């Protein structure tokens, strides 16, 4: 509804360009299948992914009606400051509450691609200046296969509460709607001329340090 109402106001005020923050969650759970911008059909398994996909559809319909240009940016897991939610913030807060133990949702085998927010912004600005089509979609993310949740937990423990014991769950999903693994292709963005400087692991390490500082200011 937010997207619908934004578009309604844009039409009234004759605003002709829209750059939309979408998500890799629109693809659903396709296992190890490489997720490219042309992958389909799309069956999201979370309300979040379903609503992002619906927003993409509303936007492309608006291009036919009145929008002069629309770019759809499909994000991976984005980390950095300011942090309001997410696995790293959750881990940091749990360890600060109990420095001796970290409980992890799922068995830690979930593997996701992570991108630092500073590089996400850089990528969007780059695409805006280079993409030529009236409507286009881009996966934004690192070029690697991602990082396991168990490794994020270990990195957070090492930075926040060395020696804390890790306690994992038994399922390969952390919550209902969680996609445990996916292979995210950013080949289209690379062909346009942009690649990130940080790997998933490097982005996570930087974010852990930043978020730990956020939660424990001097």
Image: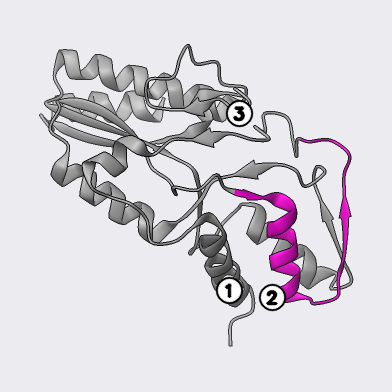
In the picture provided, is 140 more to the left or to the right than 183? left
In space, the residues marked 3 and 2 are separated at their CA atoms by: 31 Å
Above or below, 145 against 118 in this view is above
Q: What stretch is highlighted in magenta?
A: 147-172
For marks 3 and 2 on the same chain, the one whose residue lies earlier in the sequence: 3
Name the residue that disc number 3 marks.
32
Q: In this view, does 12 lie to the left or right of 150?
A: left
Tell me how far mark 1 sits from mark 3, CA to CA: 30 Å
- Report the mark closest to the observer, 3 or 2: 3
Task: Check the picture and name the quadrant holding the C terminus.
Answer: bottom right
Q: Quadrant of the N terminus?
A: top left
Q: Name which residue lies at 78% across and 76% down.
A: 161
Residue 192 drawn at (x, y percent):
22, 41
**Mark 2 residue element:** helix
197 magenta-colored: no
> In this figure, which residue is indicated by the disc labeled 1?
209
Q: Residue 159 carries which label?
A: 2
Image side of residue 193 versus residue 121, left or right? left
Q: In this view, does 98 lie to the left or right of 28?
A: right
- Residue neighbourhood size for the residue with mark 3, other residues' Cα within 10 Å, grouped as few (<14), some (14–19), many (≥20): few
* Residue 19, image x, y percentages: 26, 37
Rendering coords of residue 103 (x, y %):
85, 55
């Amino acid at each position: 509804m937010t997207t619908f109402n934004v578009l309604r106001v844009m039409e009234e005020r004759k605003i002709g360009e829209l750059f939309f923050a979408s998500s890799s969650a629109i693809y659903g759970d396709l296992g190890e299948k490489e997720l490219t911008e042309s992958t389909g059909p799309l069956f999201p398994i979370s309300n979040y992914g379903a609503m992002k996909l619906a927003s993409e559809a509303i936007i492309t319909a608006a291009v036919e009606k009145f929008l002069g240009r629309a770019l759809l940016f499909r994000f991976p897991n984005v980390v950095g400051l300011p942090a309001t939610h997410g696995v790293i913030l959750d881990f940091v807060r749990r360890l600060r509450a109990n420095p001796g133990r970290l409980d992890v949702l799922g068995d830690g085998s979930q593997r996701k691609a992570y991108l630092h927010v500073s590089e996400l912004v850089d990528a969007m600005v780059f695409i805006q200046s280079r993409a030529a089509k009236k409507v286009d979609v881009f996966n934004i993310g690192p070029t690697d296969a991602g990082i396991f949740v168990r490794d994020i937990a270990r990195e957070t423990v090492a930075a926040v509460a060395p020696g804390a014991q890790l306690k994992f769950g038994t399922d390969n999903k952390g919550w209902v709607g969680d996609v445990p693994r996916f292979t995210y292709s950013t080949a289209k963005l690379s062909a346009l001329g942009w690649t990130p400087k940080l790997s998933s692991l490097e982005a996570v390490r930087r974010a852990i340090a930043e978020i730990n500082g956020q939660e424990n200011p001097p």
